[in-house]
Image (spheres, grey):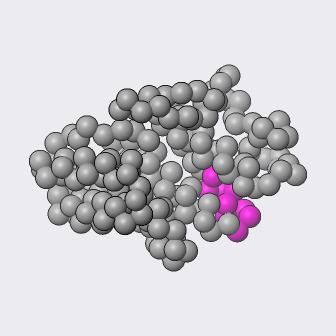
Amino acid sequence: MAWVTESGRPRRLLVLEGPRDRGADCKRCQRRIAPPACACSVTAHWSVASRGTEAYLVLGRIAEAQEHAEQVRALARAHQQRGPEAWGLKLLGDVQAREPAGAKQAGDAYRQALALATELGMRPLVAHCHLGLGTLYRKMGRGDQAQEHLTTATTMYREMDMRFWLERAERELAGAGRHGAEPESDHA
């Protein structure tokens, strides 16, 4: 584990050490997340891969983040777990949104995650998808769509009393109001 500071706030993230080709290890069984499968719960593997994706994004290691996000989605689909699948899609959107040529794929991943999260009643994830889409559309210069999604995210975060994410969404919304100016946002 490592501490990464974002906007003056410490955040505990799993940082995977070692060679880049090693993959993530399950802490319970000490095997790679990728096949072969182990006897541990799918949730344990999903959690490690999800945190790995987030950690690699913070570190700017996009290829590793992409690999872990794909593992999250693959594990969820293989075990027919629709909630983790929605999170995996959202993580794929986060990763692809970092690549200049990935805007279309990011938008597709966020929209798929949004549809699934809405169907499953996963309100925090729905809000995160709106934030991702709003941020993506702002970067693409699509101000009206950015405003719509960021306003929805802001409203949802406020209703759920998710203050950290509310502040982030408000910063993005202010950035959208400046017609595509880069906001002072965290990469999380």
Compared to residue 58, the image places residue 83 above or below, namely below
Residue 48 sits in quarter: top right
- What kind of secondary structure does the magenta stretch mostly adopt? helix
Compared to residue 82, the image places residue 169 above or below, namely above
In which quadrant will I find the C terminus?
Answer: top left
Work out which residue is located at the far top of the displayed protein and give it.
18
Residue 83 can be seen in this image: yes
In which quadrant will I find the N terminus?
Answer: top right
- Is residue 14 shown left or right of residue 140? right
Is residue 79 rendered magenta in the image? yes
Looking at the image, which residue is at 47% across and 73% down?
118
Compared to residue 113, the image places residue 179 above or below, namely above
Name the foreground residue: 9 vs 15. 9
Looking at the image, which residue is at 30% across and 65% down?
155
Looking at the image, which residue is at 83% across and 46% down?
36
- Is residue 54 shown left or right of residue 16? left
Q: Position of residue 54 (x, y in %)?
A: 52, 41
Work out which residue is located at the far front of the displayed protein and give it.
161
Looking at the image, which residue is at 71% across and 30% down?
22
The magenta region covers 72-80
Work out which residue is located at the far left of the displayed protein and give it.
178
Work out which residue is located at the far bottom of the displayed protein and give it.
119
Q: Position of residue 163 (x, y in %)?
A: 37, 51
Is residue 100 rendered magenta in the image? no
Q: Position of residue 119 (x, y in %)?
A: 51, 77
- Is residue 165 shown left or right of residue 22? left
- Is residue 3 shown left or right of residue 26? left
Q: Position of residue 115 (x, y in %)?
A: 46, 72
Residue 140 can be seen in this image: no
